[in-house]
Amino acid sequence: VAALQDEKNSLMSENEIMNDRLEQLDDSLDDPSTVVAKKYFSAQLQLEQLQEENFRLEAAKDDYRVHCEDLEKQLIELQHRNNELTSLAEESR
């Protein structure tokens, strides 16, 4: 029982230390002059820029997909028209 109480006390003190360190890290993120906060905000800005670029590229991809589908339809129509004209040319020969 004594050993378990000692282990419990040790874990509780370690937990307090970890919570203190966590609070210090949280405080360092709140202070914009610290190196950690600067890196954090820089990474956050870069993430937002990449998300915007990703959104823009997804929209462009969708536009190109629609354009490609339209071109494929035109190609099929032109192939049919070409076949018709070829058969008419052969008949007139």
Image (cartoon, helix red, strand yellow):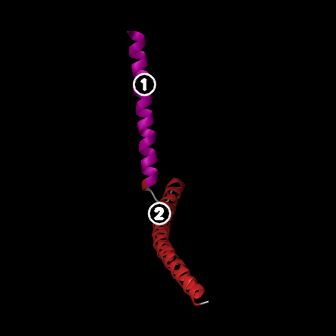
Q: Position of residue 55 (x, y in %)?
A: 45, 66
Q: Is residue 15 magenta?
A: yes
Q: Is 12 part of what is drawn in magenta?
A: yes
Distance from Cα at disc 2 to Cα at disc 1: 41 Å
Q: Residue at x 42, y 50 (%)?
A: 27
Label 2 vs 1, first from the N-terminus: 1
State whether residue 38 is above or below residue 15.
below
* Number of on-image labels: 2
Q: Which residue is mark 1?
A: 11
Report helix, strand or loop for mark 2.
Answer: helix
**Where is mark 2, residue-wise?**
51
Q: Nearer the viewer, mark 2 or mark 1?
A: 2
- How packed mark 1 is, by other alpha carbons closer than 10 Å (few <14, some 14-19, many 20 or more), is few
Q: Main secondary structure of the magenta part?
A: helix
Q: Is 40 above or below relative to 74?
A: above
Q: Amino acid at mark 1?
A: Leu
Where's the N terminus, which quadrant? top left
Report the magenta residues as a range: 1-29
Q: Are marks 2 and 1 in contact (CB under 8 Å)?
A: no
- Residue displayed at 60% across by 85% down: 90
Disc 1 is placed on an element classified as: helix
Residue at coordinates 44% horizontally, 35% vertically from top-left? 18
Q: Single out the residue that lies furthest toward the right.
A: 93
Residue 23: x and y, percent? 41, 44
Q: Nearer the viewer, residue 30 or 62?
A: 62
Quadrant where the C terminus lies?
A: bottom right
Residue reaching furthest top?
A: 1
Disc 2 crowd, CA 10 A, few/some/many (<14, 14-19, 20+): few
Identified by mark 2, the residue type is Gln
Return the mark for residue 81: none
